[in-house]
């Protein structure tokens, strides 16, 4: 053994061939300070060893290296631009020393190689990738770009156009794409990886491959003339800028950085990369996105704890075969869990099957699956009019009409058909789980499993614990949600649960603005400018006025002190006029089908007349006032949910809003948003609107925390509650 540390060891494989293995004490390899220090030690030992002719770099874990240790990021970022540039210079010197070793290097990439993990691979002369492994530079998702040579080496290796796509898109790239684009040199079966990489390394030692030429290519300016260079970067700016939008500066900064250093040698290019990285890292968006990543890790950790305590769901069922039922069936079947789809009539079953088939065909068209996988997934869905096969079901999702009487009857009926210990879950968005459980013989086996529409796109599933729900029922439901590729967040029962309970004060703020004479189109523009994917009027059209009015009634009954209201709202007026939104082509807007078959929003000139009496006389509102009146009720209600224990932590609350209703990710979540403003400043702002009612009045604990200078997150990277 040439060198043995806690995370890295180096040993001879055979004569002249050495292997540097990343072998963390933890479940995955990451590049933290300790690992980088050991890498320096390992390289020093290799340079001093007299007999080294070639180096293989590999991993003892299922993944290669998943990236830098993000928990160390924020401390470095807080030190300021100069300190960041200095820190990057040290890491670049270390990475450069891999590339400058006096013998060839080959990376054997056996699993995920992301961020800094892939940047290490880029310093090697050749890369061999296991089929099924993925590589990429996802840093833009954290509000930064690759800062350890990624923006320099990758475009010189795979070309400007490919590098723009890889770096600005931040995707994890499959083996076939990595090989096609030239990011790796070979793809082999996992069991052949080490032997193939060693064979390539021996070929380099024998002079069959010119590894030195590879190094010259990566150290030199990009080989395009001035016009080609301008076209490559300028054309990308328009596409990527439009996709990234104004709130996410990292993709555009990455392109500009690559353009700036395209004509430079490696060392000068790395300096340019570092300066641009430091500027991005001190941008206010970065801590919000890094914080979200860490909150997501915490949510996954909580999910794993539940998952560890239960057996996986091997056979599922869904009751109700409409669009929602078909979406759930598709999600389950496409992820490998067979599912029965039960309804009371053939037409509904066909609708559900058509929905699943449509979604699978879209996957086929995009190249995400092939025809055999499509056929297999469809085969996992069994439509049925009877309960004949329910004796083998582990978990049932009830997705019938949102009516407590109907749901109770169906739940009691299906419970009698299930084997002992099977879990029953209701996909209700508003109805009390504790109340629905009164219809059941075994309420301990029952919980809520609230999917968001459309099921295949929305990552969140709320798992709702009723008063009598057992830990096993929650754990099994969490495990099933994770098997579907969803992010489950466990919440306690209350009207609207977490997400809808928080969303409806936001809609109440919208209704009150209309009552006071605000223009719904201006509100939509302002809130979309704030970062929401769609404004509240547009969102209500997507949700449906019937659904919104039903949920509004539930919330008003549950929280009459602040969610009940007098007089007819604009939403109620539209519902009475049967303007339901997108589902029947008219709501706040009219909808026309575009060339792609999707509903296109059109302003309806008749609307002001139709809303007379339900809205106030038009008057001007400033954008800041609109934002305040929309956001204050949402934020305070989120705090109430945290204080009442409806949600387990501030991190889970913020992630639920980002994943469930599209809260602007770059703003970090409702509680992070309060922290950024400062609790004292937030309470002062809310007090300006206290006359609007209790929705605008901070809780006593908020005021106490404000007085004590407390926050919901100790730092931007903390995932814990207050």
Image (cartoon, helix red, strand yellow):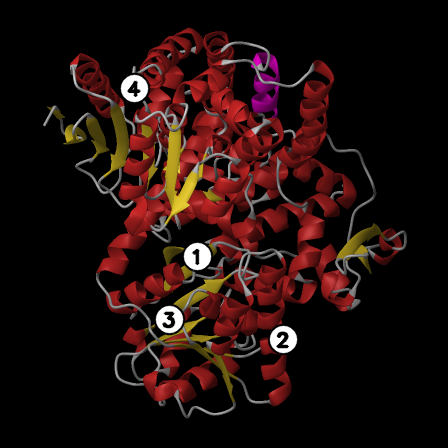
Q: Is residue 301 visible?
A: no
Mark 3–mark 4 contact, CB under 8 Å? no
- Residue under circle 4? 103
- Magenta span: 252-261
Question: Would you call the spot at circle 4 few (<14 residues within 10 Å), some (14-19), or many (20 or more)?
Answer: some
Please, which residue is most extreme toward the left here? Answer: 1
Say the numbered circle drawn on residue 486.
Answer: 1
Q: x%, y% of residue 182?
A: 51, 35
- Along the line of sight, which residue is nearer the eye, 125 or 267? 125
Q: Indicate whether residue 410 is drawn in magenta.
A: no
| Distance in Å between CA atoms under marks 3 and 2 | 34 Å
Q: Is residue 393 above or below residue 65?
A: below
- Residue under circle 3? 434
Please identify the quadrant where the C terminus is shown: top left
Which mark sits nearer the N-terminus, 1 or 2?
A: 2
Question: Would you call the spot at circle 3 few (<14 residues within 10 Å), some (14-19), or many (20 or more)?
Answer: many
């Amino acid at each position: 053994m040439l060198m043995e540390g806690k995370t890295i060891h180096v040993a001879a494989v055979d004569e002249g061939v050495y292997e540097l293995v990343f072998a963390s004490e933890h479940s995955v390899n990451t590049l933290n300070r300790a690992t980088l220090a050991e890498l320096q030690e390992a390289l020093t030992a290799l340079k001093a060893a007299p007999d080294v002719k070639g180096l293989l770099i590999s991993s003892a874990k299922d993944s290669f290296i998943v990236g830098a240790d993000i928990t160390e990021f924020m401390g470095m970022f807080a030190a300021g631009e100069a300190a960041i540039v200095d820190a990057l210079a040290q890491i670049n010197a270390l990475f450069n020393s891999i590339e400058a070793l006096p013998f060839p290097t080959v990376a054997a990439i056996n699993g995920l190689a992301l961020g800094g993990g892939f940047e290490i691979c880029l310093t090697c002369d050749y890369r061999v990738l296991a089929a099924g492994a993925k590589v990429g530079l996802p840093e833009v998702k954290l509000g930064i770009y690759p800062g350890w040579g990624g923006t320099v080496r990758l475009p010189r290796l795979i070309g400007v156009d490919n590098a723009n796509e890889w770096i600005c898109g931040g995707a994890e790239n499959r083996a076939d794409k990595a090989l096609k684009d030239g990011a790796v040199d070979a793809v082999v079966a996992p069991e052949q990886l080490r032997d193939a990489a060693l064979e390539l390394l021996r070929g380099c030692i024998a002079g069959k491959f010119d590894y030195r030429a590879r190094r010259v290519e990566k150290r030199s300016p990009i080989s395009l003339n001035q016009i080609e260079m301008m076209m490559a970067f300028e054309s990308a700016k328009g596409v990527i800028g439009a996709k990234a939008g104004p709130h996410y500066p990292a993709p555009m900064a990455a392109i500009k950085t690559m353009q700036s250093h395209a004509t430079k040698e490696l060392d000068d290019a790395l300096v340019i990369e570092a300066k641009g990285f430091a500027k991005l890292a001190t941008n206010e968006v970065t801590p919000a996105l890094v914080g979200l990543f860490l909150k997501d890790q915490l949510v996954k950790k909580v999910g794993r704890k539940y998952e560890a305590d239960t057996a996986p769901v091997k056979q599922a069922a869904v009751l109700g075969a409409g669009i929602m039922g078909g979406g759930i069936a598709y999600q389950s079947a496409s992820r490998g869990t067979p599912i029965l789809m039960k309804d009371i009539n053939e037409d509904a079953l066909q609708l559900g099957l058509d929905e699943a088939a449509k979604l699978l065909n879209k996957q086929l068209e995009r190249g995400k699956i092939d025809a055999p996988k499509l056929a297999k997934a469809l085969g996992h869905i069994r439509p049925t009019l009877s309960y004949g096969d329910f004796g083998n079901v582990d978990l049932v999702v009830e997705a019938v009409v949102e009516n407590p009487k109907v749901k109770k009857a169906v739940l009691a009926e299906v419970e009698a058909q299930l084997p002992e210990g099977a879990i029953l879950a209701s996909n209700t968005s508003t109805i009390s789980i504790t109340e629905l459980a009164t219809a059941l013989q075994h309420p301990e086996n029952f919980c809520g499993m609230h999917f968001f529409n459309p099921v295949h796109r929305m990552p969140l599933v709320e798992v709702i614990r009723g008063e009598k729900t057992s830990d096993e029922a929650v754990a099994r439901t969490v495990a099933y949600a994770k098997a579907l590729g969803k992010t489950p967040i466990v919440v306690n029962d209350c009207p609207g649960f977490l997400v809808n309970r928080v969303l409806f004060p936001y809609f109440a703020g919208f209704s009150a603005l209309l009552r006071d004479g605000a223009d719904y189109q201006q509100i939509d523009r302002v809130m979309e400018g704030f970062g929401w994917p769609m404004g509240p009027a547009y969102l209500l059209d997507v949700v449906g006025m019937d659904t919104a009015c039903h949920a509004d009634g539930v919330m008003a009954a549950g929280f009459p002190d602040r969610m009940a209201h007098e007089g007819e709202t604009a939403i109620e007026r539209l519902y009475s006029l049967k303007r339901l939104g997108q589902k029947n082509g008219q709501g706040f807007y009219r909808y026309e089908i575009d060339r792609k078959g999707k509903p296109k929003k059109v302003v309806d000139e008749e609307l002001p007349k139709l809303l007379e009496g339900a809205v106030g006389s038009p008057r001007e509102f400033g954008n800041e006032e609109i934002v305040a009146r929309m956001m204050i009720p949402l934020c305070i209600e989120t705090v109430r949910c945290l204080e009442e224990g409806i949600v387990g932590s501030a991190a889970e609350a913020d992630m639920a809003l980002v994943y469930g209703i599209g809260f602007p990710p770059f703003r970090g979540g409702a509680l992070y948003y309060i922290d950024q403003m400062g609790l004292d400043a937030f309470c002062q702002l809310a007090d300006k609107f206290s006359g609007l009612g209790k929705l605008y009045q901070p809780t006593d604990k908020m005021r106490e925390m404000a007085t004590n200078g407390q926050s919901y997150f100790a730092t931007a990277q903390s995932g814990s509650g207050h």
